[in-house]
Image: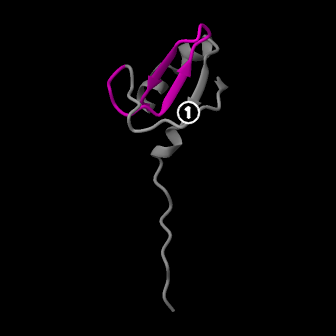
């Protein structure tokens, strides 16, 4: 898949399939744009790859961040 650098997705961006928060923006060759949650992006990944669509994927934001703990000595 091609990767596109684009403005970050916000909590207002919604999946075109189910309405959940979108973490993936797909720009089609004709200029159209689709938004997907991580689940639906994975589900349609093969077809998007075949279309050579440009993908902006922020699904890594779903991974838990490491917790930093201040230790008092």
Q: Residue at x 49, y 79 (%)?
A: 70
Q: Residue at x 48, y 88 (%)?
A: 72
Whole-percent x, y for residue 9 in the image: 49, 35
> Toward which corner of the image does residue 54 lie, by quadrant?
top right
Q: Which SS does the magenta portion mostly show?
A: loop
Q: Residue at x 50, y 38 (%)?
A: 59
Taking 70 as reference, is 6 above or below it?
A: above
Which residue is the extreme one toward the left? 19
Residue at image mark 1: 57
Colour setup of the view:
one colour
Whole-percent x, y for residue 62 in the image: 45, 44
In this figure, what is the number of numbered marks? 1
Whole-percent x, y for residue 22 in the image: 42, 31
Q: Quadrant of the N terminus?
A: top right
Whole-percent x, y for residue 37 in the image: 42, 30
Q: Residue at x 53, y 43 (%)?
A: 60
Indicate left or right for 20 with 8 as reference.
left
Which residue is the extreme one toward the top? 30
Foreground of the two, 31 or 54: 31
Q: Is residue 23 magenta?
A: yes
Which residue is the extreme one toward the bottom? 73
Which residue is the extreme one toward the right? 2
Indicate left or right for 35 with 48 as reference.
left
Residue stretch in magenta: 17-37
Q: Is residue 27 magenta?
A: yes
Q: Within 10 angstroms of label 1, few (less than 14), some, or many (20 or more) residues?
A: many
SS assignment at label 1: strand
């Amino acid at each position: 898949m091609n990767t596109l650098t684009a403005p970050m997705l916000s909590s207002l961006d919604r999946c075109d399939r189910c309405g959940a928060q979108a973490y993936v923006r797909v720009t089609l060759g004709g200029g159209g744009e689709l938004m997907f949650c991580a689940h639906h992006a994975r589900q349609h990944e093969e077809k998007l790859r075949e279309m050579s669509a440009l993908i902006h994927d922020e699904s890594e934001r779903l991974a838990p961040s490491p917790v930093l703990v201040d230790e008092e000595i």
